[in-house]
Amino acid sequence: MARIIDSIDGKRKMIKLSTDDIISVIREYQNITHNCGSFSDIRSALSDTVIFIPEDL
């Protein structure tokens, strides 16, 4: 599960991903973009999609 880590300066947060999280994101990316023929198509498909990563509590 992903873990959100606050930065010291409070400006940005980092998200630590587990191996399973990374595999899940890649799998989702492949499912979304498998019919895309160009970078433009990929960007368009991804801009219309939300990918959620569960947070470790």
Image: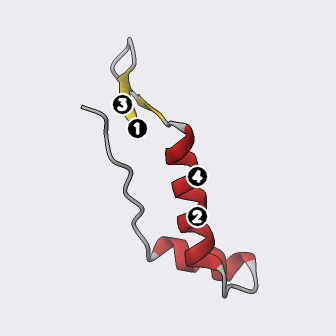
Measured as percent of width and height from the top left, residue 21 is found at 49, 46
Would you say 36 lies left or right of 4 here? right
Q: CA distance from mark 2 to mark 3?
A: 22 Å
| Secondary structure found at label 4 | helix
Does label 2 or label 3 sit earlier along the sequence?
Answer: 3
Does label 1 or label 2 sit earlier along the sequence?
Answer: 1
| Secondary structure found at label 3 | strand
Q: CA distance from mark 1 to mark 2?
A: 16 Å
Residue position for label 4? 23
Query: Mark 4 near mark 2, Cβ–Cβ under 8 Å?
Result: yes
Task: Report the amino acid beneath label 4.
Answer: Ile
Residue position for label 2? 27
- Seen at 73% across and 75% down, the residue is 39
| Secondary structure found at label 1 | loop
Measured as percent of width and height from the top left, residue 17 is found at 49, 37
Task: Report the amino acid beneath label 1.
Answer: Ala
Residue position for label 1? 2
